[in-house]
Image (tube, rainbow, N blue to C red):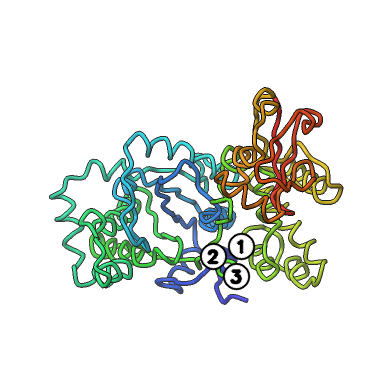
């Protein structure tokens, strides 16, 4: 178990979050006294966060539960540049309107995890566009640029890799480190924030901010990173064959979210229970020790706990019941992802392949046809053998048609 004294760092260490810390002893002392204030930044590149950001959200939640004050920093300003970290090419630039719409969508993801308000440990949400859009270019160069050397900046992994591979690295992207570091300086001045944390891919940017606060204001601040999460088989956390596992219910239904966790690889169950649930460690150790078919009990627990945190207990129970109906009894359930299609379109000869694409089970008609060719496509639990098969009125049962892609992915077509 961890040697940290503060509840926050002890929890992070015991549950396997921590990879790097700038000043471990000093940070432990800070977190063990008074109300530690820490932040994580989230750029607004989409209108929802996905499971890949859940680790950071959970760390903010751990901070609040340990008596600290979380700050959610929305990157309204930095998104205008685009974080180049670990990217092989420049991100597409978004308009102000796109960024504002994305921030509005992203805000929904934090509400189930954090208590926002005006209290000493209540979370707050701020937008770095409030200061980045107002600082003058000369002011930025004089206050921030003077503390950074090109010698150090070109040694950052992303910059060095792009230069070595002779890939373009724009001057716009080169400024991202300065902008993110300036965020830390502003939050130190405005909120007395003394901790920035995030994924380990942000280590260089976080250290840059720590150094800037020290050089510019003499402030003692700290940085902490968590491990980047990959699956046991080496896949990227939050990415599936269907695409990203979004946190917003309008992008990924509670049932689909539940199913994502239920499909966790055996070797990942214990680790994910520690990181993404609040079950006691001794209970997690018991679940992790299950073998054979019993490991599925641990996966159901993981799915229920993770879904409850985001969507609530009722949604988790409904998803579990839906999964039981689909997998155990072979029936359908209302909680399955559903797409509405007019009855006229169905009886008019809608191709099964088109229905699979409309329901989000495949990304194209061609992919659906390949699924049929492989014998992995079913309509109402009956295998489809003809790649050009069409739906009919006979397929509509109680107003819906159940589609299955393999054994684990299902959706309903609702005739309207």
For image coordinates 77% across by 31% down, the residue present is: 396
Residue named by callout 2? 229
Reading the chain from its start, which is encountered first: label 3 or label 1?
Answer: 3
Say what secondary structure mark 3 lies in: loop
Q: Nearer the viewer, residue 375 or 225?
A: 375
Residue 112 screen position, x and y as percent: 60, 43
Say what secondary structure mark 2 lies in: loop
* Visible residue check, residue 67: no
Residue 355 screen position, x and y as percent: 64, 38
Q: Do the residues under discs 2 and 1 have CB atoms within 8 angstroms?
A: yes
For image coordinates 53% across by 50% down, the residue present is: 50
Q: CA distance from mark 3 to mark 1?
A: 18 Å
Residue 33 screen position, x and y as percent: 50, 62
Location of residue 62 with respect to 291 vertically, above or below: above
Reading the chain from its start, which is encountered first: label 2 or label 1?
Answer: 2
Location of residue 178 with respect to 154 vertically, above or below: above
Say what secondary structure mark 1 lies in: helix
Q: Give the crowd class for mark 1: few <14, some 14-19, many >=20 residues within 10 Å.
A: many
Q: Do the residues under discs 3 and 2 have CB atoms within 8 angstroms?
A: no
For image coordinates 17% across by 45% down, the residue present is: 136
Mark toward the viewer: 3 or 1: 3
Location of residue 45 with respect to 227 vertically, above or below: above
The disc placed on residue 240 is none
Residue 37 position by quadrant = bottom left
Mark toward the viewer: 2 or 1: 2
Residue named by callout 3? 233
Look at the image and tell me in which quarter the C terminus lies: top right
């Amino acid at each position: 178990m961890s040697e940290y004294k503060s509840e926050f760092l002890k929890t992070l260490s015991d549950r396997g979050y921590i990879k790097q810390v700038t000043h471990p002893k000093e940070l432990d002392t800070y977190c063990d006294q008074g109300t530690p204030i820490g932040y994580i930044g989230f750029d607004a590149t989409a209108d929802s966060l996905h499971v890949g950001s859940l680790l950071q959200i959970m760390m903010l939640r751990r901070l609040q539960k340990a008596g600290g004050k979380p700050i959610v920093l929305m990157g309204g300003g930095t998104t205008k540049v685009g974080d180049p970290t670990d990217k092989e090419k420049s991100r597409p630039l978004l308009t102000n309107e796109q960024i504002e719409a994305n921030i509005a969508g992203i805000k929904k993801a934090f509400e189930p995890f954090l208590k926002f308000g005006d209290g000493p440990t209540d979370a707050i949400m701020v937008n770095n566009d409030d200061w980045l859009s107002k600082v003058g270019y000369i002011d930025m160069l004089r206050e921030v640029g003077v503390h950074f050397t090109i010698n150090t900046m070109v040694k950052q992994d992303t910059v060095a890799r792009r230069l070595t591979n002779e890939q373009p690295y724009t001057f716009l992207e080169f400024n991202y480190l300065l902008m993110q570091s300036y965020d830390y300086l502003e939050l130190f001045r405005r909120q007395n924030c003394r901790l920035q944390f995030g994924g380990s891919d942000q280590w260089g940017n976080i250290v840059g901010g720590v150094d800037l606060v020290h050089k510019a204001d003499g402030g003692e601040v700290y940085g902490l990173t968590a491990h980047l999460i990959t699956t046991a088989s080496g896949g990227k956390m939050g990415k599936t064959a269907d695409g990203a596992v979004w946190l917003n219910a309008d992008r990924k239904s509670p049932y689909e979210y539940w199913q994502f966790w239920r499909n966790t690889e055996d070797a990942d169950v214990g680790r994910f229970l520690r990181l993404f649930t609040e079950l006691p460690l001794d209970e997690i150790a018991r679940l992790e020790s299950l073998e054979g078919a019993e490991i599925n009990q641990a996966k159901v627990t993981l799915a229920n706990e993770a879904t409850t945190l985001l969507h609530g207990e009722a949604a988790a129970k409904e998803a579990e019941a839906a999964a039981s109906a689909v997998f155990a009894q072979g029936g359908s359930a209302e909680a399955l992802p559903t797409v509405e299609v007019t009855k006229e379109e169905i009886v008019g000869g809608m191709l099964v392949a088109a229905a699979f694409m409309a329901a989000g089970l495949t990304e194209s008609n061609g992919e659906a046809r390949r699924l049929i060719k492989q014998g992995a496509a079913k309509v109402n639990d009956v295998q489809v053998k003809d790649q050009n098969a069409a739906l009919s009125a006979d397929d509509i049962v109680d107003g819906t048609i159940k589609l299955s892609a393999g054994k684990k992915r299902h959706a309903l077509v609702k005739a309207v």
